[in-house]
Image (cartoon, helix red, strand yellow):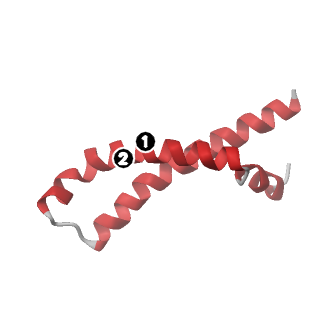
């Protein structure tokens, strides 16, 4: 149960593909909810772009973590 094994699982094509889909869907919804008004007003700053990027990064990380943990649990059983 090393970090290397965890990262290898996290980089499996199926895990990355699933996490990207989740990030795109959830990140888009959250970006519109949290930053849509600023984007529509044309007042986007570097800070806002950073926040928007993190809005997509967080669901990617959560989906990756959940997938890796599920795969590891299946391998144990």
Apparent side of residue 24 relative to residue 49 in the rendered image (left or right):
right
Describe the element under mark 2 as helix, strand or loop. helix
Q: Are marks 1 and 2 in contact (CB under 8 Å)?
A: yes
Q: Residue at x 42, y 41 (%)?
A: 26
Instruction: Bin the neighbour count of mark 2 within 10 Å (Cα to Cα): few under 14, some 14-19, many 20 and up.
Output: some
Front residue of 39/3: it is: 39
Residue farthest toward the bottom in the current orientation of the protein: 46
Q: Is residue 31 left or right of residue 59?
A: left
Within 10 angstroms of label 1, few (less than 14), some, or many (20 or more) residues?
few
Q: Provide the residue designation for mark 1.
A: 25
Outermost residue to the left: 41
Q: Quarter-wise, where is residue 8 in the image?
A: bottom right
Residue at 79% across, 33% down: 73
Q: How many labels were placed on the picture?
A: 2
What percent of the width, then of the height, locates residue 12? 73, 50
Q: Which mark is residue 1?
A: none
Farthest residue in the top direction?
77
Residue 28 placed where, x, y %?
36, 47
Residue 26 in the figure: left or right of residue 20: left
* Location of residue 72 in the rendering, given as x and y in whole percent from the top left corner: 79, 38
Q: Is residue 27 above or below residue 66?
A: below
**In the figure, residue 38 lies in which quadrant?**
bottom left
Image quadrant where one finds the C terminus: top right
- Please give the residue where the numbered disc 2 appears in the rendered image: 28
Q: Give the residue drawn at x 72%, y 34%.
A: 70
Seen in the picture, residue 6 relative to 69 is either above or below; the reply is below
Quarter of the image for residue 48 reads: bottom left
**Of residues 38 and 14, the one drawn nearer to the viewer in this rendering:** 14
Label 1, secondary structure: give it: helix
């Amino acid at each position: 149960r090393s970090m290397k094994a965890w990262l290898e699982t996290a980089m499996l094509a199926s895990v990355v593909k699933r996490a990207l889909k989740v990030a795109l869907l959830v990140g888009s919804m959250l970006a519109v909810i949290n930053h849509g008004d600023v984007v529509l007003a044309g007042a986007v700053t570097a800070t806002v772009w950073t926040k928007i990027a993190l809005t997509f990064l967080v669901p990617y990380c959560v989906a990756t973590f959940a997938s890796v943990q599920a795969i590891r649990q299946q391998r144990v059983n």
